[in-house]
Amino acid sequence: MPPPERSVTGRSLAPRHVTSPMGPLGRGGLSPGPIYALRSPGANETMRGIQMGDDATWEDRLEHASATFSRFVPDAEPARVLASMERRMGALGTFAFTAVGEMWDRPGLTRRDRSLMIIAVLAAQARNEELELHTAVGLRHGLARIEIEEINLHIAAYAGFPAAMAASRRMDAAFREAEGVAEIEGRAPADHLSDPERMERAADVRASLTGGRANPDPRADLEALRGHLGELGDWAMKWAFGEIWSRPQLSRRDRSLVVIATLVALGQEAELSFHVRAGLNHELGRDEIREAMTHLCLYVGFPRAVQGMRTAMEVFARIDG
Amino acid sequence: MPPPERSVTGRSLAPRHVTSPMGPLGRGGLSPGPIYALRSPGANETMRGIQMGDDATWEDRLEHASATFSRFVPDAEPARVLASMERRMGALGTFAFTAVGEMWDRPGLTRRDRSLMIIAVLAAQARNEELELHTAVGLRHGLARIEIEEINLHIAAYAGFPAAMAASRRMDAAFREAEGVAEIEGRAPADHLSDPERMERAADVRASLTGGRANPDPRADLEALRGHLGELGDWAMKWAFGEIWSRPQLSRRDRSLVVIATLVALGQEAELSFHVRAGLNHELGRDEIREAMTHLCLYVGFPRAVQGMRTAMEVFARIDG
Amino acid sequence: MPPPERSVTGRSLAPRHVTSPMGPLGRGGLSPGPIYALRSPGANETMRGIQMGDDATWEDRLEHASATFSRFVPDAEPARVLASMERRMGALGTFAFTAVGEMWDRPGLTRRDRSLMIIAVLAAQARNEELELHTAVGLRHGLARIEIEEINLHIAAYAGFPAAMAASRRMDAAFREAEGVAEIEGRAPADHLSDPERMERAADVRASLTGGRANPDPRADLEALRGHLGELGDWAMKWAFGEIWSRPQLSRRDRSLVVIATLVALGQEAELSFHVRAGLNHELGRDEIREAMTHLCLYVGFPRAVQGMRTAMEVFARIDG
């Protein structure tokens, strides 16, 4: 569960629920896609993630953003950080402080969750300088080094080895700096596995990814994948599922969050649709997935985040029949 | 209006209209998409953008390309630039001179318009060296520094902050070089706004983007966006529309051109479809949008430019019923 | 024809055909796409590419991977390369050795073919360090320098000039190193062509790309392209087909492989669909195209490779009626 909304400075925050009378629905949308009839939330589902206020003052906004930057840049006064960013970058500096700062202070996902996602999308997109910075931020948000390294295995599988190799170099620079060492020692290799061992581990992953709908006989399940994907089915089964997803260093739920974010960054809706469902099977909440799409807009841009949100909503609607 | 076609050297140019008898339509296409039945142009629409000659001599082509490079590299003889590029890069050098040079000398969009687009797509794609070069070219094509900085705010919103932050560093290097200073001074921050102020500005933007079809009550309009996009609707409304699109430093028409180019570079057809329509509402001409797609092929590759052209043609066809 | 499967060390390899009893097809797939009813292979089509074993031991896997790295890093013992990669990168190092090593040792495409593809996708994705490395590997796999330079012309056309210019710099570094020179001398420019010359060459390319279905009158064929693509049709016809695809420095079959790989990397399915068919017209085998999609998963990630495989299978199914 994410932590409850809190004020870092102790000042009470502007309410985030809708306080104003709403008029009728407008005719124009951001894009000409279908309008989704949003279900009322079920008993175990809150509307907190959905409700937002329309009446925050500038001071309210500044307080949220400042709370974030007091964590990003712990040894500087947030007001001075803002002034410095505006002097160096003008309006871009204002927005890099306020939009980014407000986003990271939202409820709905923990800061550790947000770091999992943002490290993944920076690596997938080869945003090198930001990746080094956010690796350091991720460590401060409670991610262990081996968890961040685990993110990068999914980058290898979902964005390719060249992306992961480049990301590895930038992450390493941040790790060495954080640990104050010239070289990271004692890294553990992956297990050296035979095909039968890979298949057995893959079967366990396929069961959790699909909520028990995959054929429990891994050879039969693989045969089904081959029907879709030819030889790619073998690589998905034995390597991606059997060797990466099966590792115990990061929870399945966290891996789903990493992969969902990566697929949004890559704009891969077909695969995303499968992994939104897998994320739900791995105990990600619908509100968490929606909050993930919201946060991602600042790191992959609105168009891909909007596509991600649409894909997630379509999956939810299909599940609800 | 774009300037009329002209010869920089004073030599009369090869006619660009179709001068040869045409056979029946071929059976094969570049891609197996539907064939668009092109409407005859209406009264206020010219065919100039459509008509091209098939009989330019090498000398005609060289003259157009040389006119461009005399502006790109003002202190060198174009013939020597071509010889140098061919010596260093072989056939790639030939094409980087002729294809790029001919494209930038086309009518249909001003050079300032072309620079707006190309700076945007280089930033969106993190093409760093080229971005620095084209920032300098953009200044020579009549863009002010604050206009180029304005492009980058749309990159933050449409491609994400990491892309914009990296672009900011490369643009800055070109600005410092052009202004002959060690540091750019006196940048203005964005206005520090409350939610009601953001909503009010967003309403004005939504009205112009949608040609008056958005609900004029911004709270009702936001509620409609939330129906499509969940919480992303809040960020689109308050930040992208209320804080970026609403700024007076660049015209809405120029912003539409920047965003259309960015969406083509990102391959985001759904969002592009909305923004082609918005561009028409912002007084971009159909010919200008088609010329934009044509120019972009050299900077994002044919496949994305072709998708962009198809999306634009589909929007035009829907408007015409 | 690709070389027959072989063991570099002389040890007999694990059989790659399916040796285990198969259960019924599973209900879950990697993605919720349609299940393709795979045809039985025809008389001239082998199943070799499809059949894979499920029972390789770790030693079998290690042997394939070691065979690859003895070629990638000729002056080091593969076992020491693996140990070094694992020490520096942990599990990522294990997979960068085993997955990459096993893939490059597969039958179905020659190593030269694989290098053609991988150089293309690294250039298209701006993976700079890996591109320099793989340019050197490509030379060792039998590609001539002018063939690798030819790949980059397709990058200019399909991913844009900025990608090609950056790639050119990295390729050049590898060429200079391999040739032991400070500067590559004597590069040949492209022919300096008039429009009629470009159209004539384009007609020949269009005939081979479409298997003779394009209108043999290039002006009529161009008019058809204009109907789809407006002015972009002129640039596709005269430049991409007339000046790049028509060059004799690389076979049409090899160019098709390069372009297919590039389109998979860019996630451009519509264009890919055309070029899979064009590849078949250029004598690429279906098994080769499927093997290409398989290999690409390690360099562009599963989602794009999976989309590529689906697109290829759809084209095959349409051809078979």
Image (cartoon, coloured by chain):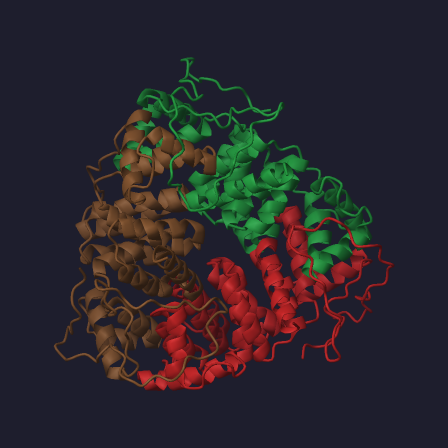
Chain colours: A red, B green, C brown
Residue A136, percent from left and from top = 53, 68
At horizontal 62% and vertical 70% (from top left) the residue drawn is A318
In the foreground, A81 or A54: A54
Relative to B293, is C44 above or below? below
Residue A298, x across and y down, in percent: 61, 58
Residue A122 appears left or right of A67: left
Residue A145 in view in this figure: yes
> In this picture, is A238 found above or below B211?
below
Front-most of residues B49 and C203: C203
Residue B8 versus residue C242: which sits nearer the camera? C242
Give the quarter of the image for residue C20. Answer: bottom left
Q: Assign the C terminus of chain C to one quadrant of the image.
A: bottom left
**In front of the other: B89 or C201:** C201
Instruction: Name the residue furthest left.
Output: C10
Left or right, B247 with respect to C53, comes to: right
Q: Position of residue A127 (x, y in %)?
A: 49, 58
The residue at the point 59 percent across, 58 percent down is A307
What is the count of numbered marks?
0
Location of residue C179 in the rendering, given as x and y in whole percent from the top left corner? 18, 49
**Is residue B176 among what the camera can see?**
no
